[in-house]
Image (cartoon, rainbow, N blue to C red):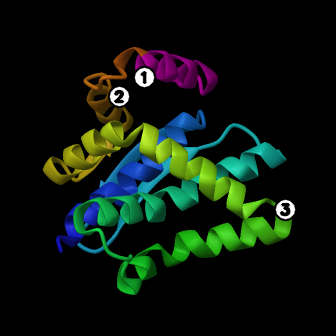
Amino acid sequence: MNSQLFLAYHEAGHVIIALLNNCYVESCFIGRYEGLATYYQFNNQKSCRNKECQIAFAGYLTELYLHQSLYETSFPTRLKSRSCKDLSKIYYLVKKYQLNKQNIKINTSRKITIYWNDIYLVANALLTQPNLSSEDIEKVLKRSKNKIFWKKRFKLINKKYNKAP
């Protein structure tokens, strides 16, 4: 099992779900053993807590989806442990803000399925170039089948966060 492949998909999942939730993704990086997607949210209302949980769930759920599509077996516990920080964040937010974890998980899984080809594009870009800037991510997604959607999404996000187009 290629751990770099799973790590790239994990971070790509965070990136796509963050963008779908109108967050500005500054960068995404994968190292030998861990990765990091850096993003910003606009405000701190309860709806943002749901979005934060979706983004945190995205890495784990993307790895789960990839594993099931490749191996058609249950998800190994050792892979779940890589998402430990994300899962801790989810449990904290759910408890503190009384969020519906199951609904968040279902909504995130649905988005991962719908945007799987875009996650694939970002993951493969990360495997080629392990450190992607916001501009790199935008270029990758403008090659997507959903390029019109992404062009509009980046325009909205860049305007919202006062970023140059």
State how many labels appear: 3
- Tell me the SS state at disc 2: helix
Task: Find disc 1 in the rendering and name its residue.
Answer: 150
Q: Residues within 10 Å of mark 1 (few under 14, many from 20)?
A: many
Look at the numbered discs 2 and 1 and tell me whether their residues touch, using CB distance below 8 Å. yes
- Location of the C terminus by quadrant is top left
The nearer-to-camera label among 2 and 1 is: 1
Please name the residue shown 70% across and 54% down the image. Answer: 103
Q: Which circle's residue, 1 or 3, is located before the other in the chain?
A: 3
- Magenta range is 149-165
Disc 2 marks which amino acid? Glu
- Tell me the SS state at disc 3: helix
Look at the numbered discs 2 and 3 and tell me whether their residues touch, using CB distance below 8 Å. no
Q: Residues within 10 Å of mark 3 (few under 14, many from 20)?
A: few
Task: Find disc 2 in the rendering and name its residue.
Answer: 138
Residue 59 placement, left or right of 91 = left
Residue 110 lies, in percent from the top left, at 53, 45
